[in-house]
Amino acid sequence: MKKMISWALMAVAALVMTACATKSETNDVNNFRIKRGTNLSHWLSQNNEDRGEARRLHIQEDDFARLDSLGFDFVRIPIDEVQFWDEEGNKLPEAWDLLTFALDQCGKHHLRAIVDLHIIRSHYFNAVNEGGGDANTLFTSEKSQQDLINMWYQLSDVLKGYSVDSVAYEFMNEPVADDHEQWNQLIVKVHKALREREPQRTLVIGSNLWQGYETMKYLKVPEGDKNIVLSFHYYNPMILTHYGAWWTPIGKYTGKVNYPGVLVSKEDYEAASDTVKAIIDQNHYTTQVWDINKIREDFKDAIEVAKKYNLQLFCGEWGVYEPVDRELAYKWTKDMLSVFDEFNIAWTTWCYDADFGFWDQQKHEFKDKGLVDLLTGKK
């Protein structure tokens, strides 16, 4: 009789241990560890012209091997709805094949990856939707929100086989909601939907209004989920990082930029157009001292939010437009890297090979070796 009771107790204990182990496994922090990376931009995102052979050849195995050999440990892969689904919601197979090819190459060449849903038909971070739909109905339409979730269901169906230690999901890029709570509420919905499918997948979640550092303090993420990475983007001061950029008003400034220090002299300010003067005034470019301390101060809220939730902090986009004076670009880049290191902030530059990048795909050579040496700690 005692033996029977003993065996029964052992069986119950085994069931309890199994249940506890299952619960612990579900809540375990996975091994998705990141530090230094870059964006593979304008390939499966913001690329509405190249299809077929041109798109297939744009990023190849040697690109992943190169990034690995340079010392990068991960990539962010922006993808757009219009490249993966037609207007009826049917999959466009070529883009799916390219995405799985990229993730396979990441695995082969020791790179982790973040799959970033960059632009969708119901939401685009600029005023006019490149996706062809109505801009930013996402925050006012339940259907649009369910469409977003359904896209991630389909992505999960294809990507769930990749290890949670190697592939993460960024379920939306640069949200632009009129109210911060609209974004926080959508986070809850998408998080719940994905957690039902993939309990331990790392999810990258950014702040409202273009993933700005200024709005990190309003961000709310589900409590107790340690497999979340908090993300912000940073291009300040824009007058330096976007100097000469045709698509932004500050790109029309043609005077000198100083860094570190006060960015615009009184003489250069007076020579500017009224439109540019208004932007300079709005951003205090003639009075504010810009240096490593200013960057550190700007990051403060993001760092505090990451500490509050005890989560990894990640700067998903930062960089300098290619035509910007290289001495200025390097000074700013050095300061950014110093602050990243100081506060253990992971990062991906914008970007690998486009107009903020360091690699020339046409010539198959570095277009800015100095920048690469800075980014990889060789300079």
Image: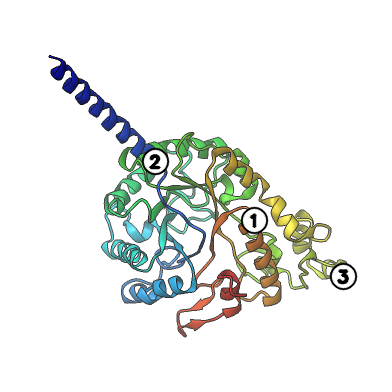
Q: Where is residue 73 in the image (x, y as percent from the top left)?
A: 46, 64
Q: Calculate the distance from the C-alpha at mark 1 to the C-alpha at mark 2.
A: 27 Å
Q: Which label number is shown at residue 267?
A: 3
The answer to whether residue 196 is left or right of residue 361 is left
Q: Calculate the distance from the C-alpha at mark 3 to the C-alpha at mark 1.
A: 36 Å
Circles 1 and 2: CB atoms closer than 8 Å: no
Q: Is mark 3 on a helix, strand or loop?
A: helix
Q: Mark 2 points at which residue?
A: 28
Q: Name the residue under label 1.
A: 342
Q: Position of residue 179 (x, y in %)?
A: 57, 38
Q: Closer to the N terminus: mark 2 or mark 3? A: 2
Q: Quadrant of the N terminus?
A: top left
Q: Closer to the N terminus: mark 1 or mark 2? A: 2
Question: How many residues crowd around disc 2 within 10 Å: few (fewer than 14), some, or many (20 or more)?
Answer: some
Q: In which quarter of the image is the C terminus?
A: bottom right
Q: Closer to the N terminus: mark 3 or mark 1? A: 3
Q: Is mark 2 on a helix, strand or loop?
A: loop
Q: Which residue is drawn at 46% across and 41% down?
A: 226
Q: Which residue is drawn at 52% across and 56% down?
A: 128
The answer to whether residue 280 is left or right of residue 30 is right
Asked if residue 317 is positioned above or below residue 267 in the image, the reply reads: above
Q: Nearer the viewer, mark 2 or mark 3?
A: 2
Q: Position of residue 252 (x, y in %)?
A: 70, 69
Nearer to me, 335 or 206: 335
Question: How many residues crowd around disc 1 within 10 Å: few (fewer than 14), some, or many (20 or more)?
Answer: few
Asked if residue 133 is positioned above or below residue 147 in the image, the reply reads: below
